Image: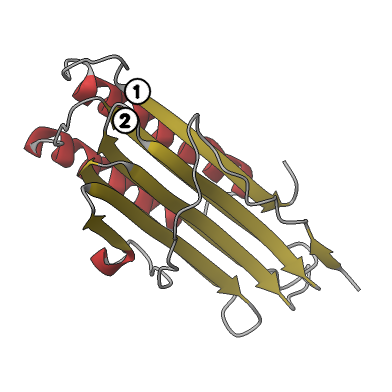
């Protein structure tokens, strides 16, 4: 019996300023799909503005479907906000295959979130989980990349930035479908994440400053079998 499952990391709050606000589950994203806009919402009341979004990618390979690879690339621009809650998650499962007939399961999720405010409360959760269930010799990789862009004043990502991000999105689609070994796939996914970080930092380099500086933060979590 080969039933490996790594413990899920605690759903800890990431970021300098954290509050508990509602997070709603998003639907499963297909290959090269962006999670539907319904997963991102904003609410106002009493002069306060709260925003939340959830992105979730799930891939499951088994004897009937030996290879499954899915990815998501979403951009959430919230504008001015008093509280922001975001969740990004990638889960990959390989089940019931053998060393002679191995499975391959890949799930990658890139989530970009922008918001503005001098005293915004942030609750950011970024998780990945790769599981082998009685699956000897299988390759299973889950990667969650969450990019948090905070600026004192609202800044919109212009057409040129959107075009550059679209190019990375297409590269991610190609990488997800490439069939590369998990170690190589992880390395190239990290390279795409570095591209996104550079694009976003350039985009806010000249953003209006306040008591706080514009900031781009990457939250990265990868899990996989074989281990790495």
Instruction: Please name whichever residue, 125 or 140, is drawn nearer the observer in this view of the structure.
Output: 125
The percent position of residue 216, horizontal first and vertical second, equals: 36, 26
Q: What whole-number distance in Å separates the C-alpha atoms at marks 2 and 1?
A: 5 Å
Where 62 falls versus 51 (above or below)? Answer: below
> What residue occupies the far right of the structure in this picture?
1
Tell me what residue is drawn at x 22 percent, y 45 percent. Answer: 77
Q: Is residue 154 left or right of residue 215?
A: left
Q: Is residue 133 visible?
A: yes
The percent position of residue 102, horizontal first and vertical second, equals: 70, 69
Quarter-wise, where is residue 136 in the image?
Answer: bottom right
What residue would you read off at disc 1? 215
Give the mark nearer the N terminus: 2 vs 1. Answer: 2
Q: Secondary structure at mark 1?
A: strand
> What residue occupies the far front of the structure in this picture?
46
Mark number, residue 68: none
- Contact (CB < 8 A) between labels 2 and 1? yes
């Amino acid at each position: 019996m080969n039933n490996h499952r790594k413990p899920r990391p605690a759903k800890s709050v990431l970021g300098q300023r954290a509050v508990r606000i509602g997070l709603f589950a998003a639907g499963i994203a297909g290959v090269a799909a962006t999670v539907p806009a319904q997963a991102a919402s904003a609410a106002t009341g009493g002069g306060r503005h709260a925003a939340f979004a959830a992105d979730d990618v799930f891939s499951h390979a088994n004897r009937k479907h030996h290879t499954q690879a899915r990815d998501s690339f979403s951009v959430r621009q919230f504008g001015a906000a008093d509280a922001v809650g975001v969740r990004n998650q990638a889960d990959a499962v390989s089940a019931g295959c053998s060393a002679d007939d191995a499975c391959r399961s890949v799930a990658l999720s890139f989530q970009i979130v922008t918001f503005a405010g001098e005293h915004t409360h942030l609750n950011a959760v970024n998780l990945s989980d790769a599981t082998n269930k009685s699956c000897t010799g299988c390759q299973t990789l889950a990667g969650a990349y969450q990019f948090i862009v905070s600026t004192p004043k609202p800044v919109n990502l212009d057409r040129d930035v959107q075009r550059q991000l679209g190019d990375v999105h297409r590269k991610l689609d190609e990488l997800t479908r490439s069939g590369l070994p998990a170690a190589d796939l992880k390395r190239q996914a990290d390279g795409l994440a570095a591209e996104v970080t550079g694009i976003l930092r350039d985009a806010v380099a000249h953003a209006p400053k306040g008591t706080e500086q514009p900031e781009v933060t990457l939250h990265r979590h990868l899990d996989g079998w074989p281990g790495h």
